[in-house]
Image (cartoon, coloured by chain):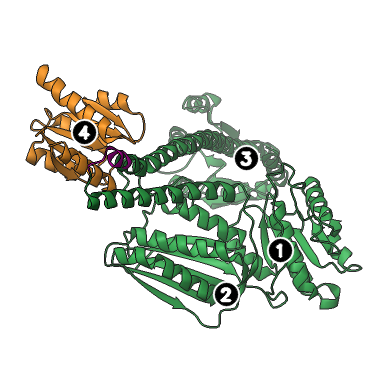
Chain colours: A orange, B green
Amino acid sequence: MRTEHILVVDDFKDNRDLFEYFLSRQGFRVTLASDGQDALDKAFELQPDLVVMDISLPVLSGWEAIRRLKAGEATKHIPVVVLSASDSSGTASDLGCEGFLLKPCLPGGMIAEILRVLDGRRTSPK
Amino acid sequence: MEQTERRTGRDMGSKQPVNILLVDDQPSKLMSYEAILAGSQENLIKASSAREALEYLLRTDIAVVLVDVCMPELDGFELASMIRSHPRFQKTAIILISGVLVEDVDRLKGYNSGAVDYVSVPIVPEILRAKVSVFADLFRKTVDLERLNKELEQRVRERTAEIEALLQSTESARQEAERANRLKDEFLATVSHELRTPLNAITGWAAMLRDGGLDPATQMKAVETISRNAMLQAQLISDLLDVSRIVSGKVRLDLKPVNLPPLIQAAVDTIRPAAEAKNIKIDTFLASGIEPILGDPARLQQIVWNLLSNAIKFTFHNGHVQILLEKTGSHLELTVRDDGPGIRPDFLPHIFERFRQGDPTSTRAHQGLGLGLTIVRHLLEMHGGGIQAMNREDVSGAIFKAVLPLPTDAVAVEPLTGTVEAGPSSAGGVTGLRSASSLTGIRILVVEDEADSREVVALLLERCGAGVMVASSAREALSILERELPDVLVADIEMPEEDGYSLIQKIRTLPPERGGQTPAIALTAHVGVSDRVKLLDAGFQRHVPKPVHPAELVSIVAGLAKLNRD
């Protein structure tokens, strides 16, 4: 069982519900956000252990939210896993994201990517 | 070039009179200069002092100053020096009248290149006349030259501007192409996102179900989510296919008389659950006594549904959506109003374009492919109507105003049989017709100036069994109408000499037995709403966009012909 705190950002409610369900079942503490600004606010305030960020978001796009997260003193240490509908893993790593998932992603795939990033960080802190 | 030469030639020929300033303190001498120069046709101005002469010089253009050297106060030399030293009087020639030495005159010439000459006393009239005439002509030529020079400069400026404009339009064409390309990329990204997002919910929950261990309530939620998202995807896919079929002209209209009010009511009822989910109230105002129109009921319902669903999508919780149907002149007007955020002004002109959405892809607040309004526009145009979008002025919100043509008195709507269907896209557009005999016995007059188009349309109609007469101009069409009585007229709008508007207006003044009420179809390239109204007002019953889609044309011709015969 894991106990880390994951912030999941997606504007599509059915996906938020799904992610919340299976990540909670895994033991993670889950917080949800539905747009880029909401995500930034919650990341700053709640200091999650990892952010799963959808890209196509209202108010503030996922890319812009990531740029600000990675530029903020209080948030730049939080690892980000990008969740995108197109293969934009290049952009993701350029922006300093630690993980990438292509939609649609299965629960097992998302959990594996989250664990890879979390454990990779624990063993080799940068 | 040509024009200037002609104008210059005329000016030179007519010898525009110039001003000759005569300066002398003695009135008798002034009168004698005047007498000598009287026959020269120039304007003679007299000044009795150098000071007065300067006033004239400042006020008007003087070609020649004729000045007496001996004058009190300011003498002729001094006046000449002042004139010569001023750049403004560069073109003005000076003739000094004196008995003095030639060297003194030469001294003056040093000032600049302006002409200075002298006439000695006693004056020989022929010499004075000759000198004045030479300087007057010189002045005229200098003025002409200056004007030509200015015109040339102006022309160079204009050409430069033209070239710059051309460069700019090339640049904007390039930008337009790039923009179209970018739109396509954005659209693909949107499609990908819109298809993958529900897919994520579907595959995710499916995997959870397969792995087991869900409680019954979660199982139910999983199944519901899967089925809802599968439906959402099905809708997206059918929109995609629909728009591609509609835009490429492969959609068939099954034309029937349609009563719009119940159809609109049915669409409102279908969409009500979606509206209630956001607590949005739909107000319906349908005018009574609306006549049936000729249309495809399923497609008309799709139009109404798409407009309503667009309005609900953009209306805030607890908002209002209004739908109005009224008759205005020769057409019906269907208005859908919402109190959402309205449409960004820079997006308004593009709102009916394919692949366009008000939001850029990465921060989109609303889901969907942005195809609904494109579908609406195309379906309305296939019905001979059109649509406009605008923002509300009273509150925030958008207004969509669709127009549909009403049948005219000459062509009342009755049930139609034998609609025609297009086969798989036929390149020439002529071979794909399944029902080749649907126009049997119908006589059609085709008016089109362009030979190839005329040929294609005639061939298409003949293949369907029609008797076709062709005319290559409005005049030829009118002369055919003097001896023939076709069942249907098909006329191009853009024709040289006399266009389709003029033709139909002339035909509508003819008595019925001479073809004055022959139902008419206008062929034109893409037109806006106002053009459609103009077409209907001019006397056309229907409009078929170019390039002509065979099934659409045949179906409309068949409909109009049948009604005309019954």
Query: Which quarter of the picture shows residue B332?
Result: bottom right
Of marks 1 and 3, which one's residue comes earlier in the chain? Answer: 3
Q: Which residue has dot 1 on it?
A: B501
Q: Chain of mark 3?
A: B
User: Considering the numbered disc 4 on the image, is that residue within a helix, a strand or a loop?
Assistant: helix
Tell me which amino acid carries mark 2: Asn
Q: Residues within 10 Å of mark 4 (few under 14, many from 20)?
A: many
According to the picture, the residue beneath numbered tag 4 turns out to be A66
Q: Position of residue A5 (x, y in %)?
A: 11, 36
Is residue B212 highlighted in magenta?
A: yes
The single residue placed furthest to the bottom in the displayed view is B289
Which of marks 1 and 2 precedes in the sequence? 2
- Tell me whether circle 2 and circle 1 mark residues in contact (CB < 8 Å): no
Q: Chain of mark 4?
A: A
Residue stretch in magenta: B206-213
For the residues labelled 3 and 2, the Cα–Cα distance comes to: 80 Å
Quote the CA–CA distance across marks 1 and 4.
60 Å
